[in-house]
Amino acid sequence: MKKIILLVCVLVQLNVNAQTLVNITPEPEMTKINQGEFLLTKQTTIISNSKTENSKKYLADYLLKFYKINLLTSNEKTKKGNIIEFQFDETDGNNNQYQLIVTDNKIKIKGNAEGIFNGVQTLIQLIPINQKELRIQALEINDAPRFSYRGMHLDVGRHFFSVDFVKKYIDFLALHKFNTLHWHLTEDQGWRIEIKKYPLLTQTGSCRNQTLIGPYGTGQYDGKKYCGYYTQEQIKDIVKYAAARYINIIPEIEMPGHSMAALTSYPFLGCTKGPYKVMETWGVSDDVLCAGNDSSFNFLENVLDEVMQLFPSKLIHIGGDECPKERWRDCALCQKRMKENNLKNEHELQSYFISRIEKYLNSKGRNIIGWDEILEGGLAPNATVMSWRGEEGGIAAAKSKHNAIMTPGTPVYFDHAQSKNEDSLTNGGYNSLKMVYDFEPIPKELSSEEAKYILGAQANMWTEYMDNEKKVEYMLFPRMTALSEVLWSQKSNKNWQHFENKIPGIFERYDFWKVNFSRAYYDIQPTITTDDYKGIKWKLTSNYPEGIIYVNSQNMKDDIEYKTPVQISSSGNYKAIIKDKKGTYLSSWMNQQFHINKASGRKIELVNPPSNSYAVGGVITLVDGIQNTKGMSKSSQFLGFSGTDLIANIDLGEIVSIDSIKFHAFEQNVSWIYRPSQVSIFKSENGVEYELSAALGEPEGKSNLIYKFVKPMKTRFLKIVAQNFGMIPSGMPGSGNKAWLFADEIEVF
Ligand SMILES: [Zn+2]
């Protein structure tokens, strides 16, 4: 009996240890906790040889930087005592697998050179922080990655970052077992890589006169000249730094679009010959490299020659995205090229452009990778596709036996907001930590045979509104840590609850590394629920341990502890905050303005579903009493329809008297979001037969549009039809594509 009790105690003890001391992300494939501890001290010796030099240096530097420990090193295999031994094993193949065994007197990491390096990253996470003694839990870990491509992207075109910060970024990748940095080096807003043959690319093309600082489309600029580029020596240094961390850098040279910096430097590259200007705002430029002029190709081949000298990467990224065909349509040389090569349209000319560059790179032993537009007009034969406009590009690539990397805007564009209460300016939509964690890179449409072409995934760090390093870190963490688990951990080991348990430890480690990160995970999470469609309830949750949510509105004297969803029956400002037991504030106030009307919280159905990318809040978004005031950065409060009409049926619950109806839409042509060409209101007594009440073509307002119908009537059922603008005509942003229709709210008074 006594023996059994003792055994139970030991197990409990081990579990406590496992929880407090073993907090590893990405989650390893197999972890077995053993009894005992290894004590890391100044007497600890690392045993390594020339094959594992990178890992030895990395670990020694890390311990010196963060623990002020100068480890002893040795290459004597026979050494005994308190040692860390790297056991190089080339038979481990190239899967980067490793084995880590911690016992009382020895830490052993076994694998090939890259495997051992990954093992070091795991060991780093086992070393306690903020403790006097560095006791490492005895255990055995066997680990290997799920995907061979584990990438992070960094855009230095919109904003430029120092060599030191790029190295820091590479270290962030290493710490999370990523193996690829996709370095976006050229853009409309700046050319950032020195090319000896074309000095104007950096003399002229690396500078813009000013930068957009307001929301996209507002025209608010800072009026300050902005410049920056990397010399070839600096690039060599960074490539070497990354290689010592087993990180491949894929350079991206954008073509034929997103080339305004190149065109400004050398106007002969364009169809109209300029003059051009390095762009000061985001978006897509109609001016692109001329596809009919051989000097464009000579230029690109010369540039790529120097790029290949600097980057050993097998894959070279050539962009290929967002290339309007306007200029090519009007250019005699481009049209001549099409005739000579029997190209049916400008999309085939784009395909000609890409495959001509591909042939050149192939002749030098390299392969191309490009954004999913390279699928248009026929895919170049050895190309790898980076699927960014959703999963479709990756699916099409895999089905045609091309390798693909998944980088869908939702959820792995890290320039999008991660908090619904975000108060800094961000670009695009909403990608929360949980959305990133739940991301599955292999689309379900693929067979297991086709799935092999999905090499992995990557998050993209577009830096439109990241003009400083701290902001990049804030947008990066903790989402990148969640992504590391998507890419490295076996699918069966991925578990959100388990990841949530690790979050306090992960945040502690960020503080230890002195990185800036988002605490949005602890934000109050508001959701709107309808109770039998009888109005709106504000539901609030928080992940804050020991945090208590309090609510208030303008009518209330004292804050009230939140217990159940709050019925919102009148318009006004409502607010919520997290406090601890003593009443100390753990968060700042979250404010929400509600606009309550006869449609708020009523039953609503949509005939056409919104696009997956802009449907975060669901159909209730249209009658949730919340109006978008912050433009695109709060697109969780919009529904977006690509090319289709919005048709909403609303049941007001009973026959009501109506004076007026307002339909809120959004317009931003530079983002291909166009106002509806017409909005119509229909009424019905039975919800089956509808009669037209009114139609409007012209809204009030600018950007935030309101279609206001002053039309007294009595009805129970309403149908709102907002007609999509349709295909975007020539001469307008996004021409040849389907227009987006964005809608926010329907109000009935
Ligand atoms: Zn041309």
Image (cartoon, rainbow, N blue to C red):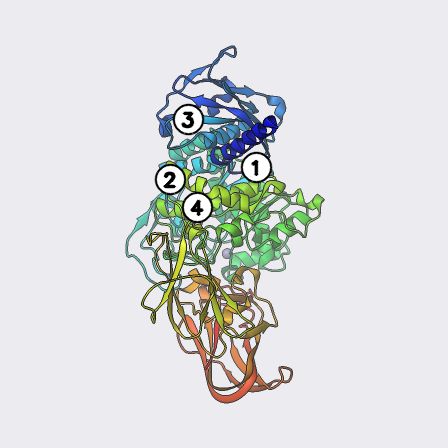
With 314 as the anchor, is 162 left or right in this view?
left
In the picture of the structure, the residue carrying the numbered disc 1 is 366
| Amino acid beneath label 3 | Leu
Marks 3 and 4, Cα distance to the nearest angstrom? Answer: 29 Å
Whether tag 1 and tag 2 are in contact, CB under 8 A, the answer is no
Marks 1 and 4, Cα distance to the nearest angstrom? Answer: 30 Å
Pick whichever, 388 or 481, lies toward us.
481
Marks 3 and 1, Cα distance to the nearest angstrom? Answer: 46 Å
User: Is residue 161 something that shows in the picture?
Assistant: yes
Earlier-in-chain disc, 3 versus 2: 3
With 232 as the anchor, is 483 left or right in this view?
right
Which mark is in front, 3 or 4? Answer: 3
Pick whichever, 169 or 684, lies toward us.
684
Q: Residues within 10 Å of mark 3 (few under 14, many from 20)?
A: some
In the picture of the structure, the residue carrying the numbered disc 3 is 134
Which secondary structure lies at badge 2? helix
> In what quadrant of the picture does the N terminus appear?
top right
Earlier-in-chain disc, 4 versus 2: 4
Residue 476, numbered circle: 4
With 550 as the anchor, is 406 left or right in this view?
right
Which mark is in front, 1 or 2? Answer: 2
Q: Residues within 10 Å of mark 2 (few under 14, many from 20)?
A: few
